Amino acid sequence: METTNVNQTISTAPVQTQSTNQEGDDMISLREIFDIFYYNWKWFVLSALICLALSRLYLATKSNVYQRQAVMLVKDEGNSYNRRAAMSTDALMALNGVLSGSSVKNEVYILRSHLLMKEVAKKLHLDVLYTLDGVLRDVSLYDVKPFEVQFFDENEDSVKIAALDVSVLNDNEVHISRIQDEEETYDFDKVVRFGQRVKTPVGILTFIPNPKYVEDFVGKKIVVTHIDIESAANIVGKRISTGEMDKESTLVRITCTDTNIQRADDILNALLDAYKQSIIADKNQMAQSTADFIDGRLELIKQELSDVEGQLASFKQGSNIVDVTQNAQAYLNQSTQARQRTIQLQAQRATVNYLVDHIRSHSEGNSLIPSLSGVTDAGIQAQINKYNEMMLQRNRLVENSGENAMTIKEMDANLRDMRQAILLSLKGFSSSVDLQVRQAQREEDELKSTIASVPQKEKKVIDITRQQVIKETLYTYLLNKREETALQLAISEANIRIIEYPFGSSVPISPRSKIIMLAALLFGCALPFVIIYAISLLNMGVRGRGDIEKYTTIPVIGEIPHVAENFDRSQIIVSEKSNDTLSEAFRLLRFNLNFVKKDARIIMFTSTVPSEGKTFISRNFAQTLALAGKSVILLDTDIRKRTQTALYNAQRREGLTSYLTGSEDNLSNLIIKGDEKYKVDLLPAGVRPPNPAELLMSDRLDQLIEELKKMYDYIIVDNVPAQVVADAGIVNRIADLTIYIVREGTIDRRYLPELERLHKENKFNNLTILINDTRLDKKSYGYGYSYGYRYGYTYGYGYGYGVGRRKNKK
């Protein structure tokens, strides 16, 4: 037996028979779960504390990650009429298979473009990383750092990646102890002053101090890592995510995750600024294209106007013409009105023809279509604006994706279709203008016929003057458009509005310390339970009263607690003055006897296999009955091993076998009387016979019992194990009560259904079970149902020292 504490639990509940479903599963009950936690609480507490400590250690090795957000609004440009026209154009293009796309979705992608990430990395110098060397984890430095490192003579296309170990010595100096690039590590040991240029294997460096924080980092090592701008842009891009707030609005949410809150805010601000600048640059590009076109046309018109004015001056000087005659004034006024209309229509036709020529001559390029007000058709203007917007988007995406990207090819196809649609619209509009010009010219010809009497020189003057007016009108129109374009170039405003500047919680989103610690606590509590439960499942031995009552309907008469390994099992521990837990267990066994069979006088002890404690229990139980004033004899029917007889150190050879063989009829000569300490008489086994089973089957055994019943109140029969030899079943015919010893953890609990079968077939008289060696201080699954003694007390009555036990500490 193993050593255990004195604080055992002895069953004081009345013996009861419970129905059992032998075919039921091994589902664990709430009471058994409670027992596992209750009797092993120290292991649960220790496991929980260890897991919590490990979780704290894990959290200490992880950097906190924070999330910051910004929200911007993508504004719709143009008036409501233009928007409606654009919507109609989009619908018409969709019917013709031309996809225009969603501007908000495009902006969501552009915000994550590699080009913008590079601009952010350059602006914030994120190609130089600073890391504080820590014990459990390294800390990334950004705004709070002792210095900044400047790299000179860099070739951006071939930046040398390097890492430096730098220690701050004092307010003026740092120490470079190691330099590493992509190829090798250099033993570089040099002290450098702040502001001093130092030549290293990875280039020329300068350390710029940050006086506010230098003293805080004295004696600490900082790893400075220099990477190329492309890698820095990739790192920034992984921290950025964008998305629409909802499908019904043009709000865009930009999120940045970083271990440094200030760096996340700066990245968002730099990204918004770079995005605004890119939009302004796109707008200026379109306006500049229009301005260049207008300047070219102005130079041409200016030259033509100068030629016409010179021609008029020469003609008047040669013809001596000063003024128009009063007689033709009325006709001239009408002719002027008709001619004015013709001039306007011809100006529109010239503008349309120019646009047609421009589109045809630039059909394979990526240039924009000038937006001129000479085209009065709103639908054509909306198509041109839509084309220019898509061309700008296409040019921006080419910088990130390349000419061969599927998206670019789709956009090129859409642009070609849009150019064809615009050409068709311009041709239709040109035809309409031509019709109107012809109509105006017919009206003008009628007026010319009316003034046929006007001198030919006067007609020449009018013709030249007419050409002059046309050129002046076109020149004035282009001057106005140039001023409008210049004003557009001067206004640097993007079509976005910042709704929310970078904001967010100071609570990190990762690692989630509360969840991790809660998971560690739950795991720490679950781990011992799983281990104990697994051990219990692997342990096929009887685990306690719970298994007995689960697999059988045999009454449990009591439980005997576990005692120390060095305990002398031949010792009689029950005495009048003994009040330890083990002694009380035998007294409770005597008490429970009344609930099973009160009038039982012949009590037989047996077990499944040897070494289950039936000899020890039968001796002490007999002593318990004797101390109650009863006359008791202990009958050793184990005539094969004679264990009980050997424990008495009986020198005589006569005993039970002598009576059964008929060699001795006088019981007084066979019985060994008890003494003052041990008040139980003994009938020893006697000489080992060659035929034990046949001898026990004789009628002499029944006669012996009848004689002993006249002499004693109780006859305690110490029998052989029931499953070893047949003697137990033979002797059981004389027993009033059979106490079957089941030692906890000794026999396989799969044997219990077989024991239940023996009980139902009445193989043993009034069969009951006594559980031996219960380990109630190590309760686990299957031990179940225990009451009574704990901590050396029973219902308020204290007890002293037990056998093989230490005194309780209060």
Image: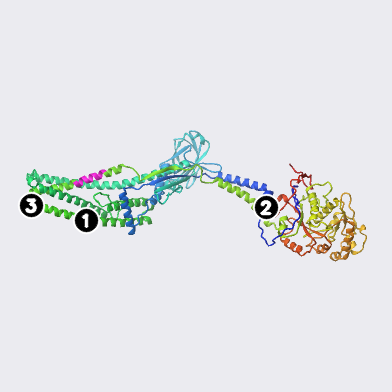
Residue under the image location 52 percent in, 39 percent down = 221
Of discs 3 and 2, which sits in the foreground? 2
Q: Which residue is mark 3?
A: 452
Q: Which mark is on residue 31? A: 2
10 Å crowding of disc 2: few (<14), some (14-19), many (20+):
few
**Image quarter in which the C terminus is found:** top right
User: Does residue 61 appear to the left or right of 545 in the view shown?
Assistant: left
Range drawn in magenta: 473-483
Q: Amino acid at mark 2?
A: Arg
Q: Confirm whether residue 252 shows in the render.
A: yes
10 Å crowding of disc 1: few (<14), some (14-19), many (20+):
few
Q: Quadrant of residue 696?
A: bottom right
Q: Is residue 278 above or below residue 669?
A: above
Where is residue 197 drawn, in percent x and y?
A: 43, 37
Q: Amino acid at mark 1?
A: Ser
Where is residue 124 drawn, in percent x and y?
A: 42, 42
Q: Which residue is mark 1?
A: 432
Q: Quadrant of residue 88?
A: bottom left
**Which callout, 3 or 1, points at the residue further toward the start of the chain?**
1
Of discs 1 and 2, which sits in the foreground? 2
Q: Are marks 3 and 1 in contact (CB under 8 Å)?
A: no
Local secondary structure at mark 3: loop
In-front residue for pair 641/574 = 574
Task: Please tell me whether residue 451 belongs to the stretch shown in magenta.
Answer: no
Q: Is residue 431 above or below residue 215?
A: below
Q: Are marks 1 and 2 in contact (CB under 8 Å)?
A: no
Q: Are marks 3 and 2 in contact (CB under 8 Å)?
A: no
Question: Principal SS element in the magenta part?
Answer: helix
How many angstroms separate mark 3 from mark 2 (CA)? 126 Å
**Which callout, 1 or 2, points at the residue further toward the start of the chain?**
2
Q: Amino acid at mark 3?
A: Ala
User: Does residue 427 appear to the left or right of 578 in the view shown?
Assistant: left
